[in-house]
């Protein structure tokens, strides 16, 4: 029988390292990804906007040649702030046209035909920004 200079303790230690190191690496990758996700959510929920358009329109009236937001989804929430946890100001119907005021991260600030202002989810299956 050949002589094995590694003790059973050393072999056990090597096995543990081979099992634990990949899991620790995976845990680090998941923590970094979670950090990016929470940073994105925080930025999307903040009140910072990326672009601003002056609201010189008559309240709620979509003027020809001016950008507007088309509601694509029935039952879309018009919210007080650009956040999914903000209070719902009004529930909108599909095909409504809303006066565009400004664009935030993932949100449009709009005004409806009654002059009520609020925020709606930007793009996707909910809204479309029309820029004639």
Image (tube, helix red, strand yellow):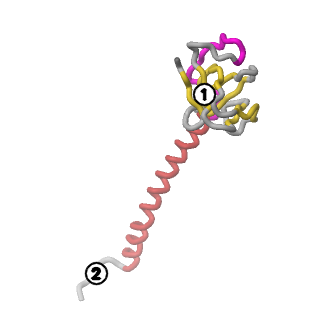
**Residue 63 sits in which quadrant?**
top right
Q: Position of residue 86 (x, y in %)?
A: 72, 35
Q: Position of residue 47 (x, y in %)?
A: 65, 28
Element at badge 2? loop
Q: Nearer the viewer, residue 65 or 36?
A: 65
Question: Residue farthest to the top?
Answer: 56
**Residue 119 sits in which quadrant?**
top right
17 versus 3 height, above or below: above
Q: Between label 1 and label 2, give the one nearer the viewer.
A: 1
Range drawn in magenta: 45-60
* Residue position for label 1: 70
Residue 65 magenta: no
Could you classify mark 1 by the number of other residues whose Cα lies within 10 Å: few (under 14), some (14-19), or many (20 or more)? some
Badge number at residue 108 = none
* Residue position for label 2: 4
User: What separation in Å lies between label 1 and label 2 (alpha carbons)?
Assistant: 76 Å
Q: Where is residue 77 in the image (x, y as percent from the top left)?
A: 70, 35
Left or right side of 120 for 17: left
Image label count: 2
In the rendered image, which quarter contains the N terminus?
Answer: bottom left
Question: Residue farthest to the left?
Answer: 2
Question: Residue at position x 60%, y 36% from top?
Answer: 126
Residue 53 magenta: yes
Q: Which of marks 1 and 2 is nearer the N terminus?
A: 2
Magenta part, dominant SS = loop
Q: Where is residue 20 in the image (x, y as percent from the top left)?
A: 45, 65
101 versus 71 height, above or below: above
Q: Which of 25 and 125 is in front in this view?
A: 125
Question: Residue at position x 39%, y 72% from top?
Answer: 15
């Amino acid at each position: 029988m050949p002589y094995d200079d590694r003790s059973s303790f050393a072999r056990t230690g090597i096995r543990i390292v081979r099992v634990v190191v990949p899991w620790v690496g995976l845990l680090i990758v998941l923590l970094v990804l979670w950090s990016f996700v929470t940073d994105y959510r925080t930025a999307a929920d903040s009140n910072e906007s990326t672009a601003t358009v002056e609201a010189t329109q008559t309240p709620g009236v979509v003027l020809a040649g001016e950008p507007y937001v088309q509601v694509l989804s029935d039952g879309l929430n018009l919210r007080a702030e650009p956040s999914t946890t903000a209070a719902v100001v009004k529930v909108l119907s599909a095909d409504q046209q809303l006066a565009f005021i400004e664009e935030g991260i993932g949100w449009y600030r709009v005004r409806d035909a009654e002059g009520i202002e609020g925020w709606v989810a930007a793009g996707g299956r909910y809204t479309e920004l029309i820029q004639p």
